[in-house]
Structure formats: C-alpha cells, structure tokens
Image: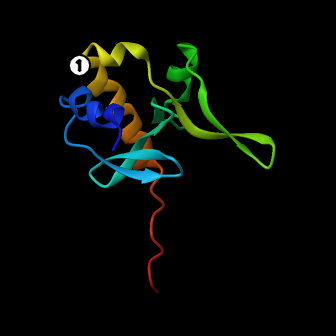
Amino acid sequence: MSEFVSYLHEVFASFGPINSKRMFGGHGIYHQGLMFALVADDALYLKADANSRAEFASRGLAAFEFMKQGKPMQMSYFAAPESIFDDPVEAAIWANRGFQAAVRAIKPSKRPR
C-alpha cells in the first residue's frame, strides 16, 4: 500500500472506514464493499454519475483518463477537490457523493421466475 493510500484512511475518518485493493497499477478505495474512489499515480478520483457529475464539472475537476490502444478513455471517476485534504467535513461530503454514485450504479439482480 502506498503512503498516499494509507493517508486516505485519515482523510476519510469522518466518512467512515475504508479499505483499498490494488488494481491496474493503482488502488480501488472501498466503503461497505463498494468502490467509491480510485487512486492512480498518487491522485484521488471519486466516482461520479449523472446525478453528481455537474458538481465535479462546476469546479473544473477532470475526469480520470487512461490510454487504451492509443486512444484516451474516460471513466466515471473525477479528480477530488484538493480542499478535502484539509477539511474532514468536506472530505466526508465528497466521499459520500462518490459512495452514493456507487450505490446508484448497483444493477438489480434478475429475479428467478
């Protein structure tokens, strides 16, 4: 676990317990079993969706982007505002925003007939 990922436990202490898993050279950040954030190159990105994307865009926060076959690909994760690293209340608000997007992304399981 990187020092930055370890530090996120402190940043999100007001939000609640988190854990991390290594993935694709970075880390997935989880709360209650749902991935609500990711870390790539020691930068934090929070999950966003149609309900929350405008909040990220209004602050000029960039979407997480990676290259696939020479083409840039965007995911539904956006850079976290720098202010969350100094304000535990704001960190909890933004973590919850990412967590709620993860909750909304859960696909209902198909019911047996």
Please give left or right for residue 23 compared with residue 93 in the image. right
Please give left or right for residue 63 compared with residue 20 in the image. right
Please say if 20 is above or below 97. Answer: below
Q: Amino acid at mark 1?
A: Val
The one of 64 and 55 positioned closer to us in this rendering? 64
Within the image, what quadrant is residue 1 found in?
Answer: top left
SS assignment at label 1? helix
Badge 1: residue crowd in 10 Å (few <14, some 14–19, many ≥20): some
Q: Which residue is painted at 28% across and 13% down in the image?
A: 86
**Residue 5 image offset from top left, x and y in percent:** 34, 37
The one of 2 and 68 positioned closer to us in this rendering? 2
Please give left or right for residue 14 compared with residue 98 in the image. left
**Residue 81 image offset from top left, x and y in percent:** 44, 18
Within the image, what quadrant is residue 27 found in?
Answer: top left
Which residue in the structure is indicated by mark 1?
Answer: 89
**Residue 30 image offset from top left, x and y in percent:** 33, 47
Q: Which residue is painted at 59% across and 23% down in the image?
A: 62
Q: Which residue is painted at 53% across and 13% down in the image?
A: 59
The one of 49 and 11 positioned closer to us in this rendering? 11
Within the image, what quadrant is residue 88 found in?
Answer: top left
Q: How is the image coloured?
A: rainbow
Q: Which residue is painted at 33% across and 18% down in the image?
A: 84
Query: So how many labels did they put on this image?
Result: 1
Please say if 87 is above or below 2. Answer: above
Please give left or right for residue 79 compared with residue 14 in the image. right
Extreme residue in the bottom direction: 113
Please say if 109 is above or below 16. Answer: below
Extreme residue in the right direction: 70
